[in-house]
Amino acid sequence: MEREYDFKKRMLEVHKPHRKNDAVWTKLTGTVLTGDWEIVFPRDAGRVLTYAARDFTEYLNVSLDIWPRLRTSGDIAGERHGRRVILATAADFPHFAPQNRDAVENPRAWALAYRLIVTDDDILVVGASERGCAQGVYRLEDILNANEGPVISPRDESYTPLFSPRMTHSGYELDTFPDNVLRAIAHQGMDAIKVFTKGVNMTEHGYQDFNELIWRAAGFGLDVYCYSYYKSEMHPSDPGAREYYDNLYGELFRACPGFRGVIFVGESIGFPSHDPHTHWDSATRPKGKFHPGWYPCEDYPEWIAMVSGVIHTYAPECEIVFWTYNWGFQPEDARLALIRKLPRDITLLVTYEMFELREVAPGVIEKCADYTLGFEGPGGYFLSEAKAAHECGIRLYTMCNTGGLTWDVGDIPYLPTPQQWNRRYQGILRAHDLYGLCGLMESHHYGFVPSFVSELCKTMYTRVDGISPDFDTELRKIAVRDFTEVNADTMIRVWDLWSEGLRHIVTEGYDQYGPLRIGPSFPLTFDQTERIPTRPYASHHTEKNIVTTTYFQDIRNTRKVLWELETMTEMGRLFREGGNLMETVLQTLTGDKLTDARRQYALGRFIERTAYTHVNNKRWHILKCILLNETGAFPCEKYSGYFEVAPREPMPEGASHDRAGLLPALGLSPTASDTEIAAEMERVAREELANTRATYPLIMEDSRIGFEPTMDYMADARSLDWKRRVTEDSLARLRAWKH
């Protein structure tokens, strides 16, 4: 059983110890590495290749228990004399450079290409650059891991990754990147990290020496992007605006010119626009006007031109990334008009699946309020802006979350739903071919945790000898490696059930910012307002939570309410079925395979428990609204996830609930009395308390379950205890109301 934050120890362990399995690898034919081999790299190699050589040596020591010699050579081209792993670049071996250069239009992605040549008595890894060689080393490790020992079949293959950058936040701790976390990120094929930036050496999480981070990351082949949290209080046409922005961004890039790029998003950098659709001052904003951060203002190009000019004065190669996240629901003509006015030397970042309005059942429209894999995408918003960017010749990136996590379940390490992830991979690959999509943002502040999903992602985003890998083949390799040959088909079925289960998840804001954000620690409330206890050092602490601990939804939309209840019930059932099937696999495993499998099993069960918490909250909410004659909505038009307010909007005079539609779906008569409704609420509360108790063993199996980097722990034992107390208090309030 794990203590809080124990997951960090595992994240700092880049290579799993003692992976060699003699029962598996000795049955394979191929080149066998032994302790009398050498690992050789050029004497004049830079940090990336040097670190990669050391990494491979450590891997062989730690994971495969063999101890070859590591050395440099002044004549690397003359080293092909047998029993050597030679690590080099195309400059050293031009005749063995990676092939299929024409298949990769993005020069940054081509730098990550490599060729792997295995003969009977030597192995040659040749990168298009040192970064490419490092990626070749990591691929060699992947192959040996799949073989569970120091054997690899002869081959001559060229690997060409399609995307660069592939950028991520930290899933270890917000804006925190120890060396081994950087190494783990690089091992998964990513080549960039992001830090929230509020000032020179200031992040959301506090002090960070940016130049030191940039230097350390570069050694592992990683660029660093700053995600701007600077507030912009001047219009670019205002007198003194150039000096103002020079004091902001000029100060940052004078001090830290090594940032590879800067990411701008409306809600973080909105400025006092002159666009007539907007109004800067929230205190005097007329109804119908938007804050400039939430509208595609016609003068954003002017703002971008000024700020990028300031930045390029001090960092000429810095990439300007403009993210259109905040105006996905604004009119398409306004969004596309803005894109067509943007400078052509910047990068457009477009979210992949958000803002989609889906008719999920007759008359039921479900909104993708924030990042979700329930809808694999692409969304119409993405397609419209991707086409416009392509027509304008603007470089295109997407926020796609393929690091392994979305907001569907907010406090877990990754979604173990590979078949559903593959549906997204395929769409992203099509966007690469159709619209020139070349870079990816693969996580937001919930961060990235290495998993079998991120391994699959790296593989699917890489072509081998110009051919895309077959997903089913690659998935089965992982199932065999992690669960043995005898269990592989069963685990693929488990993942298929979980993938289908996730396709049933609801995606509205009241769900994502509610039960799905924190899982089984989400309470049932009656007429009180509650705040979940948080850590004072968390970025989103008590005063700035990104979760509402009172469930809210206007239940007058009967058809939608009942569809969501039904689909989330089905999600829970499918995750339960998958978990039950996985129990048969656990019974056959031992050692590290069992330990790792139990963590994944706990993760699947936690998602199942989260689905049940959602269902119980919605049932309780419907009954409570009928009992108290309320609509269930917040008494305000604008939704915000940054407060906890009990929904107290009364039913309008003369209006009534659709009791005939709602109550029978909950097993009650349309004419049920208040006493009967209250009794059903008590039964729901008892069921949810039991669901909560069943969650404790799951979070003890994997301490990353229940954790999110900006909020810290949201479903730890303390939070679950709090949820039980609040729910029991709600029961007491219900009983008092009855009497």
Image (cartoon, grey):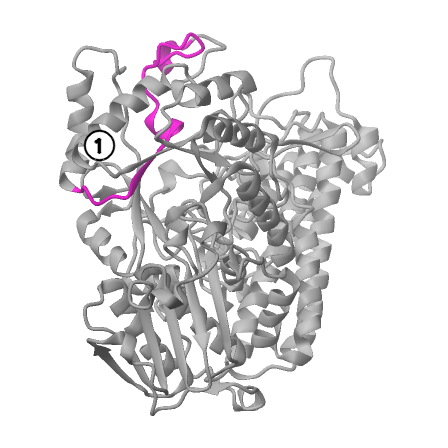
Where residue 738 appears, as percent x and y from the top left, is: 68, 36
Horizontal side of 529 relative to 473 (left or right) equals left
Nearer-the-camera pick, 496 or 104: 104
- Answer few, some or many: residues within 10 Å of disc 1's Cα (few below 14, many 20 plus, some between 14 and 19): some
Q: Quadrant of the C terminus?
A: top right
The quarter of the picture where residue 56 lies is bottom left
Horizontal side of 490 relative to 29 (left or right) equals right
Where residue 121 appears, as percent x and y from the top left, is: 42, 86
In the image, residue 141 lies in the stretch drawn in magenta: no
Q: In this rendering, is residue 51 above or below 548? A: below
Numbered disc 1: secondary structure: helix
What kind of secondary structure does the magenta stretch mostly adopt? loop
Query: Which residue is the extreme one toward the front?
Result: 95
Which residue is at a point 64% across and 67% down the rendered structure image?
Answer: 473
Which residue is at a point 49% across and 21% down the rendered structure image?
Answer: 335
- Magenta range is 256-285
Nearer-the-camera pick, 451 or 556: 451
Q: Which residue is mark 1?
A: 312
Where residue 69 appears, as percent x and y from the top left, is: 28, 86
Residue type highlighted by circle 1: His
Nearer-the-camera pick, 696 or 90: 90
